[in-house]
Image (cartoon, rainbow, N blue to C red):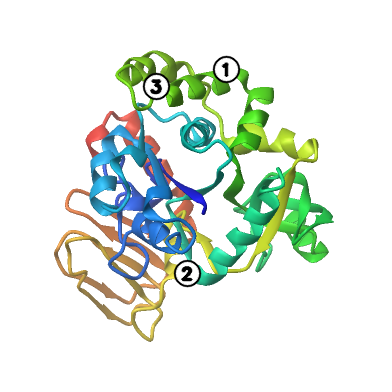
């Protein structure tokens, strides 16, 4: 069975003011149900990884909330980073801990903030990736594009192998013209940041490319159950390079021909901003307004002659919209955001401005 690792980090600045450093987006019920993004991620892994084989990598500030939301995950499988170092150290740490317990295990890495409409299709795709990973390939799952999206990186497929392809090349987020060319060619998939591999294969590649990171996570994993873990973390972790697993490992591995990709078509969405959230969730009325209820609040909204708005009712008070279209309205107890939907990505600029002003209590 798969060892499933959920990466639960970041503060989701494009979903401010709902998502904060102390209460990030993956802890919120943004799935159209009462389940948080984190819980929904764990739910869809249930058919491919039993509770003892599920792990979460998260930060110190979120460990308690993660444990509360996922009581079936053993405490020893909640891997707490003292400070964020991006995805390569987080995923490498999980791989090293799993390798200590089961050296030939197959591991999957899954972000905690994705929405997936077809969990069964997702599980089937992961199983196809596991088959190729068993042969030693570092696998990634690419999403079949539904249009020339410029907000995602792309994966160029190479020679066929099994039920997938070798990964020929990683591509950065393109402009619209390049995105149209990619989608029209049929050779490209969206990069969803979903990985499956044998832990020994991944750690071998990590040792080749990032020997310092490999040595560090190996030492930490060996000390995981012992008394020296905290001291080692405090001494070694802050020195690690901040780097993503794509840049740090996978791009060079793909150039060496040891990365494979399988396509997935299971209703995947990366909930990166409020406009995307409004596109994913079902409309709340015939005017295509989307109301997002925040945890602990009813989310009462009254709309009149208002269309296609995304309203997050997170303060407990009534929100009324009249004669406005295509807005984002996010109401929390200490901050209110009002913006046009086509500026959704720029919510992070407000966060940057508040940080520059030293108003960290709002972040």
Viewer-proximal residue, 102 or 358? 102
Image point 67% across, 38% down: which residue? 250
88 lies left or right of 252? left
Q: Quadrant of the C terminus?
A: top left
Task: Count how many numbered circles sit on residues in the image.
Answer: 3
Of callouts 1 and 2, which one flags the residue occurring earlier in the amino acid sequence? 1
- Asked which secondary structure carries label 1, the reply is helix
Q: Are marks 1 and 2 in contact (CB under 8 Å)?
A: no
The answer to whether one can see residue 176 in this image is no
x%, y% of residue 333?
17, 53
The answer to whether one can see residue 278 in this image is yes
| Cα separation between marks 1 and 2 | 42 Å
| Cα separation between marks 3 and 1 | 17 Å
**Mark 3 residue crowding within 10 angstroms, few (<14) / some (14–19) / many (20+):** some
Of callouts 2 and 3, which one flags the residue occurring earlier in the amino acid sequence? 3
Q: Which mark is residue 223?
A: 3
Image point 73% across, 33% down: which residue? 252
- Asked which secondary structure carries label 3, the reply is loop
Of callouts 3 and 1, which one flags the residue occurring earlier in the amino acid sequence? 1
- Asked which secondary structure carries label 2, the reply is helix
**Mark 2 residue crowding within 10 angstroms, few (<14) / some (14–19) / many (20+):** some
Q: Which mark is residue 279?
A: 2
Image point 34% across, 58% down: which residue? 39
Q: Are marks 2 and 3 in contact (CB under 8 Å)?
A: no
Image point 32% across, 70% down: which residue? 33
The single residue placed furthest to the right in the displayed view is 159
x%, y% of residue 254?
75, 40
x%, y% of residue 338?
33, 58
Q: Which residue is mark 1?
A: 212
| Cα separation between marks 2 and 3 | 45 Å
**Mark 1 residue crowding within 10 angstroms, few (<14) / some (14–19) / many (20+):** some
328 lies left or right of 179? left
């Amino acid at each position: 069975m798969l060892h499933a690792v959920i990466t639960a980090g970041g503060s989701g600045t494009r979903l401010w003011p709902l998502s904060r450093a102390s209460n990030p987006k993956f802890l919120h019920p943004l799935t159209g149900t009462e389940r948080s993004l984190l819980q929904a991620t764990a739910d869809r892994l249930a058919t491919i990884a039993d509770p003892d084989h599920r792990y979460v990598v998260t930060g110190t500030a979120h460990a308690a909330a993660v444990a509360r939301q996922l009581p079936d995950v053993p405490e020893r499988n909640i891997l707490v980073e003292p400070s964020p170092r991006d995805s390569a150290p987080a995923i490498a740490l999980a791989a090293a801990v799993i390798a200590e317990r089961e050296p030939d295990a197959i591991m999957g890495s899954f972000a905690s903030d994705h929405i997936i409409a077809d969990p069964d299709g997702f599980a089937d795709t992961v199983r196809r990736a596991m088959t190729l990973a068993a042969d030693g390939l570092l696998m990634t799952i690419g999403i079949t594009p539904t249009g020339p999206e410029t907000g995602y990186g792309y994966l160029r497929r190479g020679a066929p192998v099994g039920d997938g392809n070798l990964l020929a090349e990683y591509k950065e987020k393109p402009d619209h013209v390049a995105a149209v060319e990619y989608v029209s060619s049929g050779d490209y998939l969206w990069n969803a940041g979903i990985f499956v591999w044998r832990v020994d294969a991944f750690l071998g590649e990590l040792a080749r490319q990032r020997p310092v990171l490999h040595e560090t996570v190996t030492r930490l994993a060996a000390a995981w159950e012992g008394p020296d873990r905290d001291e080692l973390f405090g001494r070694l972790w802050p020195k690690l390079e901040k780097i993503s697993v794509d840049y740090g490992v996978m791009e060079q591995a793909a150039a060496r021909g040891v990365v494979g990709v399988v396509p997935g078509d299971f209703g995947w969405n990366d909930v990166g901003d409020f406009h995307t959230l409004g596109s994913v969730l079902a409309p709340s009325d015939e005017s295509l307004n989307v109301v997002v209820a925040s945890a602990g609040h009813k989310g009462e909204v009254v709309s009149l002659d208002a269309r296609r708005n995304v309203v997050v009712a997170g303060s407990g008070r009534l929100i009324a919209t009249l004669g406005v279209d295509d807005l984002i309205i996010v109401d929390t107890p200490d901050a209110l955001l009002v913006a046009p939907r086509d500026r959704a990505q720029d919510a992070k600029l407000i966060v940057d401005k508040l940080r520059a002003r030293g108003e960290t209590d709002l972040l």
